[in-house]
Image (cartoon, rainbow, N blue to C red):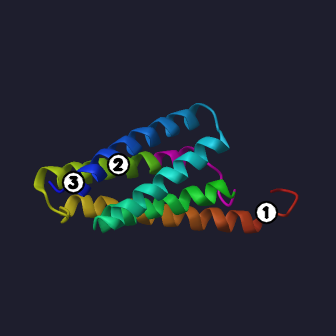
Amino acid sequence: MDAMIQSYMEETEEMLQRAEECLIQLEMEYSSASVNELFRIAHTIKGSSHMVGYEDIGNLMHKIEDMLDCARNETIPFDEKIASLCFDGLDTVKKMLQFKKENGSSEMEEPFAKTALRISEAVDDFIQAGKKRKRKLSPLQR
């Protein structure tokens, strides 16, 4: 395995572990610092994935990053739905990484691609619904 890919794999696995720890903390108690850290992790994984040619992982992490950015900016509330989508996304990324590691390929199996697409669409729907809800609230309700 190429040294850059090996380094990417190791760093991404560590970041995914830290992301899960942030999510667990957020499930127990909301913290804007944890949301910001989770956002930074998603951003870093997205960028490094695109850099090594793993567009599928980068694209999924971009969706998660977008959702977390909305939560950071309070366009949508950080709630159990966001946590669930993040856990699903992180689990899918772990499986995608494992597949790439075992097969030495940047290609992705169909089930992973379908799962990533389902999560991406759910994130898009969630963001849009949150934005519509926020527009309906008066300034005093926000």
Above or below, 138 relative to 6: below
41 left or right of 113?
right
Secondary structure under tag 1 reads: loop
Give the label on residue 137, or none. Answer: 1
Specify the segment rendered in magenta: 74-84
Residue at horizontal 63 percent and vertical 55 percent from the top: 71
Above or below, 66 relative to 72: below
> Which x, y percent locates residue 19?
46, 43
- The kind of residue on which mark 3 rests is Ala
Q: CA distance from mark 2 to mark 3?
A: 14 Å
> Which x, y percent locates residue 8?
30, 53
Q: Nearer the viewer, mark 1 or mark 3?
A: 3
Residue pointed to by mark 2: 12
Secondary structure under tag 3 reads: helix
> Which x, y percent locates residue 50?
35, 67
Give the label on residue 3, or none. Answer: 3
